[in-house]
Image (tube, helix red, strand yellow):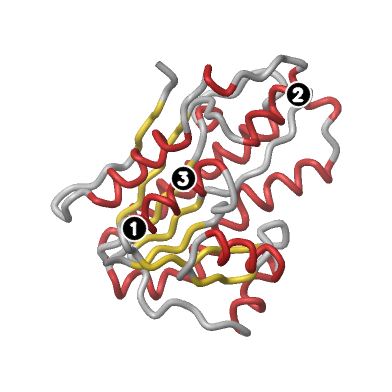
Amino acid sequence: MGTHLITGAGSGIGAAVAERLAERGEELWLLARDARRAAELRERFPGARTLVGDLAEPGKLSWAFSHQPQPERLDSLLHVAGVVELGPVADMGVKVWQDTLNVNLLAPAELTRLLLPTLRVSKGHVVFVNSGAGLNAHPEWGVYAASKFGLRALADSLRGEERTHGVRVTSVYPGRTATPMQAKVHAQEGKEYDASAWIDPGSVATAVLTAIDLPRDAEITDLTVRPS
């Protein structure tokens, strides 16, 4: 049985990953932005433990963690949480950029930094659930894509740095997936949302588990998942 810390477990892909791991009897640590959300996650995933830390304020994560118990072993750190705001670069002010970069890039970087000592001891696995927007940037996706391009760079650098410590690093690039975020994207695009047209979150969860379940003699570095 492994120990896994997941961000974004409240809905979408993160919830699907947490459900799969819980079904297998794995030990779950779920990151919550506040105490209320932590209580909701523990109710949804009985037996799971929670850490409270707001990804929107990455500079405060170290302080928040210093006041809470943390896992003594960590087999995987699964970065799934994210935010999106669409619009032309000409209309995107500094606050939109900062809010997006905080959650999608700076918080994963800081969370990884804080947990690397534990991951090294366990020879654990860091998984970044990125996006197709982390491979190709399209009009009105500039802010989100920039955060995801940065996340890709973070993963690539981390992989090279941590190889000697036995820590594996995987980036997963899902296409459009039927999540609350996707519903928001459609609303911003002015399009009707049909969840059945897109990838089921469980399919992306399968990709994530495939990466972390791979035998130690190999490593999936990049995995792209597209709607069929």
- Please provide percent x and percent y for residue 211: 29, 45
**Label 1: which secondary element:** strand
Q: Position of residue 53 (x, y in %)?
A: 65, 68
The residue shown at (61%, 18%) is 194
Q: Is residue 91 above or below residue 80?
A: above
In terms of depth relative to the viewer, which is nearer, 215 or 91? 215
The residue tagged with tag 2: helix, strand or loop?
helix
Q: Please provide percent x and percent y for residue 48.
A: 47, 68
Crowd tier of the residue under label 3, counting other residues whose Cα lies within 10 Å: few below 14, some 14–19, many 20 or above: many
Which residue, given by chain and number where applicable, does mark 3 sit on?
Answer: 16
Which of the two discs, 2 and 1, labels the residue nearer the N terminus? 1
Q: Amino acid at mark 3?
A: Ala
CA distance for labels 1 and 3:
18 Å
Vertical order, 151 against 76 (above or below): above
Task: Write down the residue under mark 2.
Answer: 187
**Amino acid type of the residue that numbered disc 2 sits on in the rendered structure:** Ala
Q: Nearer the viewer, mark 1 or mark 3?
A: 3
Asked whether the residues under the numbered discs 2 and 1 touch, taking CB atoms below 8 Å apart as contact, a structural biologist would say: no
Identity of the residue drawn at 42% across and 37% down: 202
Quick check: 67 left or right of 166? Answer: right
Indicate the amino acid at tag 1: His
Mark 3 against mark 2, which lies toward the viewer? Answer: 3
Q: Position of residue 70 (x, y in %)?
A: 49, 79
Residue under numbered circle 1:
125
Kindly state the secondary structure of the residue where label 3 is placed.
helix
Of the image marks 3 and 2, the number of the one nearer the N terminus? 3
The quarter of the image holding the N terminus is bottom left
